[in-house]
Image: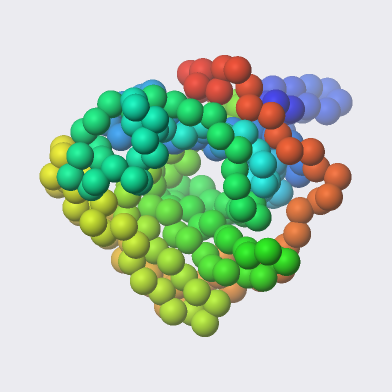
């Protein structure tokens, strides 16, 4: 990976320190397993923007990523819901398929917003991924997925997603009742932003395009290393 930057790394004359990554830097966007500190999902991404208001990163097509599968190799979402979250899992490296994803996250917010396109850069939708607020470290950001999500369409209509998974996670003990309440409240706050057409939906990110000179990031061998500040 390129530039692993945090506030403890000197940058510039006089030992000045830069608190943010620069456009084009490559970092890791990772998720821990629910109820564990172990990383089970890792996506190398390229920084688009990083400042006090927003982290924007690009997940390029064909990027090698890590995602969990069942121990027998079955993709998680092909397993019946009743047993999906109780069977053992192992990590698998696969290339990201499709047209790429732009991910947007504001500091401290319990969700990130992902933009999807079809072929030819025809904008498809926004996807609000409810999650723990991103925790920055020298090599990227870490979070924990909260199962419940929201789809938002170009006509500003929206709908909840994965409510069945959200309920099953509670049944299987992966989502304590108190956390489930907080997640639903976070989702309702996100819906308020959608209805008001606040940032990032109003910000025309769907017109953004990646720098063609950016290389596809590599997956480091130590992709699951402990987060070091």
Q: Is residue 221 left or right of residue 22?
A: left
Q: Residue furthest bottom?
A: 155
Q: Residue at x 83, y 50 (%)?
A: 212
Q: Position of residue 42 (x, y in %)?
A: 52, 33
Quadrant holding the N terminus:
top right
Closer-to-camera residue (81/139)? 81
For the question of whether residue 98 can be seen, the reply is yes
Asked which quadrant contains residue 162, the reply is bottom left
| Render colour scheme | rainbow
Closer-to-camera residue (104/81)? 81
Q: Is residue 32 left or right of residue 136?
A: left
| 225 up-or-down from 98: above or below | above
Asked which quadrant contains residue 4, the reply is top right
Q: Is residue 89 left or right of residue 87?
A: right
Q: Residue at x 65, y 55 (%)?
A: 99
Q: Position of residue 182 (x, y in %)?
A: 25, 52
Q: Residue at x 32, y 49 (%)?
A: 147
Q: Residue at x 48, y 18 (%)?
A: 226
Total marks placed: 0
| 35 up-or-down from 102: above or below | above
Quadrant holding the C terminus:
top right
Q: Position of residue 34 (x, y in %)?
A: 30, 34
Closer-to-camera residue (14/78)? 78
Q: Is residue 216 left or right of residue 77?
A: right
Q: Position of residue 10 (x, y in %)?
A: 74, 22
For the question of whether residue 205 can be seen, the reply is no
| 204 up-or-down from 88: above or below | below
């Amino acid at each position: 990976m390129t530039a692993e930057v945090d506030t403890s790394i000197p940058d510039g004359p006089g030992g000045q320190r830069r608190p943010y990554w620069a456009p084009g830097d490559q970092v890791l966007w990772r998720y821990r397993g629910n109820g564990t500190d172990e990383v089970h999902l890792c996506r190398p991404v390229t920084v688009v923007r990083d400042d006090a208001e927003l982290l924007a990163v690009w997940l390029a097509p064909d990027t090698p990523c890590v995602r969990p599968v069942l121990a027998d190799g079955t993709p998680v979402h092909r397993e019946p819901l009743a047993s999906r979250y109780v069977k053992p899992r192992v990590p698998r490296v696969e290339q990201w398929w499709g047209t790429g994803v732009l991910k947007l996250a504001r500091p401290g917010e319990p969700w990130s917003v992902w933009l999807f396109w079809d072929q030819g850069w025809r904008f498809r939708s926004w996807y609000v991924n409810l999650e723990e607020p991103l925790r920055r470290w020298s090599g990227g950001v870490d979070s924990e997925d909260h199962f419940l999500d929201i789809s938002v369409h170009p006509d500003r209509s929206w709908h909840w997603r994965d409510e069945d998974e959200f309920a099953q996670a509670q049944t299987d003990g992966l989502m304590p009742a108190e956390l489930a309440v907080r997640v639903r409240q976070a989702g309702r706050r996100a819906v308020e932003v959608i209805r008001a057409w606040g940032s990032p939906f109003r910000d025309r990110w769907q017109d953004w395009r990646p720098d063609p000179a950016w290389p596809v990031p590599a997956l480091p061998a130590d992709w699951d290393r402990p987060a070091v500040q």
